[in-house]
Image (spheres, grey):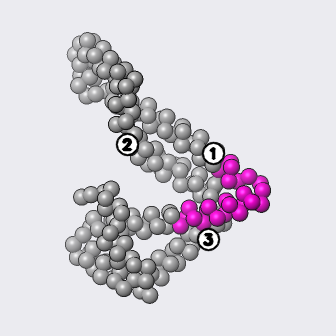
Amino acid sequence: MITADIIVLVGCILFVLIGAMVGFGKGLKFFTSGIFGIIISAFVCYLIFGFVLNWGVVGDLLAKFNNWLTEQGNVGTFFADIHIDKIVLAVVLFIIIQIIRVIIVKIIKGIVEIDNILFKIINKILGAAFMFVVALAILLIVFQIVAWIGGDTAANFAEQLKDSVFRLDDLFANNPLNAIFKK
């Protein structure tokens, strides 16, 4: 067992214990509010923007709005040229996603925090599992940042991970985030 294995093991145990103590409801609320919530909403908007844009009703409305802007003269043409219609769509979509995210989190939090022994156990188990996933996500993000730095730093880092019991060297070499965040 190498030093990196011990660090990962201790980190995961700490995260799992915190998750079990805090519970799934509070952990989910923490990781979906504030800046995390904004990042999640922006990412979801990024994923569905093209679908919503090409949806028949929305696409037709945006085309009519763009034509109307063009007919208004210089200022309207300027706004049509910068595609203010798509900007407004993105802002409205972001607001809708924010509202839906808050509602879903409140519903899930309300369900898993029911004052019942079965739900308390489920809340603790899901909290531990959720925080394990958070710990894994943090590990993958750290690996991705080191890969972006590259050069001798990444090579030395990869060398330090060799012979890992948890196969951290393979995880570093085949980080799933590489598919998302290509250079």
For label 2, the crowd category at 10 Å Cα-Cα, with few meaning under 14, some 14 to 19 and many 20 or more, is some
Distance from the alpha carbon under mark 1 to that under mark 2: 23 Å
Residue furthest out toward the bottom:
1
Q: Position of residue 159 (x, y in %)?
A: 30, 82
Indicate the amino acid at tag 2: Tyr
Q: Which residue is mark 1?
A: 106
Compared with residue 104, is residue 116 higher up or lower down, i.e. above or below?
A: below
Q: Which residues are magenta?
A: 109-132
> In the drawing, does residue 19 fall left or right of residue 169?
right
Q: Quick check: is 157 in the magenta stretch?
A: no
Q: Which residue is mark 3?
A: 17
Q: Most prominent secondary structure in the magenta stretch?
A: helix
> In the drawing, does residue 135 fall left or right of residue 107?
left
Q: Quadrant of the C terminus?
A: bottom left
Quadrant location of residue 54? top left
> In the drawing, does residue 107 fall left or right of residue 84?
right
The label on residue 121 is: none
The label on residue 46 is: 2
Compared with residue 141, is residue 87 higher up or lower down, i.e. above or below?
A: above
Q: Quick check: is 125 in the magenta stretch?
A: yes
